[in-house]
């Protein structure tokens, strides 16, 4: 049996010539008990691409993202990140060998969470160097230099010694992005990064993400921010009931949706966005 | 009164308008604050007065009854008070050791390893299911039968900390479980191994949560430490008890002991309150 391929995947505008996909999700299925949340999803992303996963809540888009770095153990299928292939192994999920493989995947694919999940007992800089020191085994000076570089990138060098509790939501999320970047991963996973933010703070996070996309970071973004998808995504995957209902460039999927479910979803999402205050 | 009564024919109304105009918001705010401060002062004054009447009344009644020997205090007071350092020493050592027991106990109770979980659960179950006094005497008198002779002081500290460790185990476990799931996920997503997640991310936050509980347990420990008098440790209660029975002046002796414990718990409670306030302030940073 040949492996299924993502029929829509194609190298993005920034992808180096001859590159192969850096992330592959092959025939991924996820059950919660008897609840079939992902029904065989295949996805390929080339280096320096940004793709957006959109869909209703409960459609499976966050589950898909969380399966890529194994925060959820897939029931069937496998994940490949930067040449490292890890199959689902739900029966031996806690075995040492499987856990070690998962750790290797996580080193390559760093995640930014909806709720930021910064470590509240550590200063900003310590949040950023924790992973590089404990996981990658970097020396402290080297880790701090890297962390400061990325803190500057998100525009928060002056918050270096603050505790996260002193930061606004937007600043927290930018620190969380810097924390993920400090691990220098191959891929960034964003799980609804602006959904927990006050509307006035969404912009600063989106700006950072757009900059990253334009500089050629490889990003998989679960989002409700259609403006971001239109601006930064190479492809948009609309997921519905655990399957891709429509996939394509943002202008097609968001501008001229073919699928009735996509149209309904967009009407509702954009409609809500336009409700006058 | 600037406005003549006869002019308007409505004196009350004129006066009301006058005061209405005079009352500046700042004045009202200041007056409300002053009135609240007065109320607080009054409450505190009555509180202390009530205590004074009750305690003072008791002291006077006892003094006039002729059945209390005031000279006992002079003769035996210093001896009984000499137990305070022993009581505090036992309590401090025991709470520190109890925290160590509880740390391992909690890790065991949270373990996925069935053997480890079983051992920790057995520990908590046995300790919580038997009286503290039995545990204390057991360590001191029963273990020597197996050649394990422990001097009184370490035996008392061991028994107390073993006991309190079991109760603290459950508190520590609850503290760990109170840390939001996102913290563990963030650490996992960074690629941190399980041991580092616990040591670097979960425990430091959990310990903050349980520090007030440790303080509470320390306060009850100072009182429960009276039980180690049964294995001849000469702390406050042992000394009071001996002084009382020797002189047939149990009332005076036990009253002094009770007062000592009472004052100690009040002092420690104040410290505890301050600690909790400090913790609450540092929570703002979290």
Image (cartoon, coloured by chain):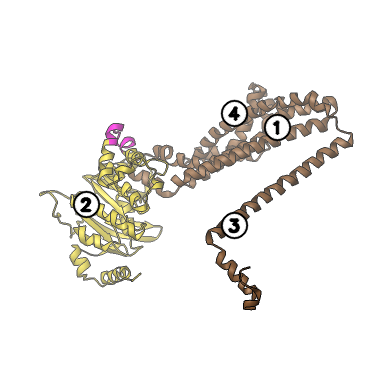
Chain colours: A yellow, B brown
The disc, 1 or 3, on the residue closer to the chain's N-terminal end is 3
Whether label 1 touches label 3, CB < 8 Å: no
Instruction: Give the CA separation, mark 4 to mark 3.
Output: 52 Å
- Find residue B136 and report its horizontal and vertical position in percent: 67, 31
Whether residue A76 is visible to the viewer of this picture, yes or no, is: no
Question: Nearer the viewer's eye, disc 1 or disc 2?
Answer: 2
Q: From the viewer's perspective, is residue A18 above or below residue A130?
A: below
- Residue sitting nearer the eye, A247 or A176: A176
- Which residue position holds label 3? B31
Mark 1 falls on what kind of element?
helix
The numbered mark at residue B93 is 4
Question: Nearer the viewer's eye, disc 1 or disc 3?
Answer: 3
Provide the chain ID for the residue under circle 3: B
Residue positioned most to the right? B66
Location of the N terminus of chain A by quadrant is bottom left
- Which residue position holds label 1? B226
């Amino acid at each position: 049996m040949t492996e299924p391929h993502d029929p829509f995947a194609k190298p993005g505008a920034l992808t180096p010539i001859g590159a192969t996909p850096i992330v592959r999700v092959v025939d991924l299925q996820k059950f919660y008990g008897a609840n079939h949340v992902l029904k065989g999803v295949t996805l390929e992303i080339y280096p320096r691409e940004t793709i957006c996963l959109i869909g209703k809540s409960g459609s499976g888009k966050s589950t898909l993202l969380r399966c890529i770095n194994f925060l959820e153990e897939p029931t069937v299928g496998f994940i490949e990140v930067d040449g490292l292939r890890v199959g689902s192994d739900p029966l031996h999920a806690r075995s040492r060998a499987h856990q070690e493989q998962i750790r290797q995947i996580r080193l390559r694919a760093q995640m930014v969470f909806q709720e930021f999940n910064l470590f509240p007992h550590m200063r900003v800089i310590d949040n950023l160097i924790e992973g590089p020191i404990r996981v990658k085994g970097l020396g402290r000076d080297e880790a701090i230099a890297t962390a400061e570089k990325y803190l500057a990138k998100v525009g928060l060098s002056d918050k270096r010694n603050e505790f996260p509790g002193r930061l606004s939501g937007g600043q927290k999320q930018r620190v969380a992005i810097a924390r993920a970047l400090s691990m220098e991963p191959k891929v960034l996973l964003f799980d609804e990064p602006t959904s927990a933010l006050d509307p006035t703070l969404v912009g600063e996070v989106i700006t950072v993400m757009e900059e990253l996309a334009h500089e050629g970071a490889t990003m998989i973004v679960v989002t409700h921010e259609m403006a971001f998808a239109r601006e930064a995504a190479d492809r948009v995957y609309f997921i519905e009931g655990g399957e891709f209902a429509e996939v394509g460039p943002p202008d097609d999927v968001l501008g001229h949706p073919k699928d009735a479910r996509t149209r309904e979803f967009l009407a509702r999402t954009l409609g809500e966005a336009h409700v006058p205050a | 009164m600037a406005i003549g009564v006869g002019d308007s024919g409505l004196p009350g109304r004129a006066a009301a308008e006058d005061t209405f105009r005079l009352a500046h918001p700042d004045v009202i705010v200041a007056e409300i604050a002053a009135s609240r401060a007065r109320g607080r002062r009054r409450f505190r004054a009555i509180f202390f007065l009530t205590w004074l009447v009750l305690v003072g009344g008791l002291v006077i009644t006892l003094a006039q009854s002729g059945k209390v020997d005031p000279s006992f205090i002079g003769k035996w007071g210093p001896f009984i008070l000499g137990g305070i350092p022993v009581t505090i020493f036992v309590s401090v050592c025991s709470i520190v050791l109890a925290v160590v027991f509880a740390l391992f106990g909690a890790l065991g109770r949270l373990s996925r390893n069935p053997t480890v979980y079983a051992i920790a659960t057995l520990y908590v179950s046995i300790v919580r299911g038997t009286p503290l006094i039995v545990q204390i005497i057991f360590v001191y008198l029963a273990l020597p039968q197996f050649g394990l002779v422990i001097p009184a002081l370490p035996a008392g500290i061991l028994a107390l900390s073993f006991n309190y460790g079991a109760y603290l185990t459950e508190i520590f476990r609850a503290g760990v479980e109170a840390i939001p799931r996102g913290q563990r996920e963030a650490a996992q997503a960074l690629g941190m191994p399980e041991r580092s997640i616990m040591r670097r991310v979960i425990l430091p936050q959990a310990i903050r949560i349980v520090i007030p509980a440790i303080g509470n347990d320390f306060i009850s420990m100072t009182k429960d430490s009276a039980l180690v008098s049964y294995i001849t440790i000469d702390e406050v209660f042992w000394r009071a008890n001996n002084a009382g029975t020797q002189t047939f002046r149990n009332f005076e002796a036990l009253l002094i002991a009770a007062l000592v414990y009472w004052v100690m718990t009040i002092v420690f409670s104040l410290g505890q309150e301050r600690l909790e306030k400090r913790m609450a302030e540092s929570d703002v940073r979290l």
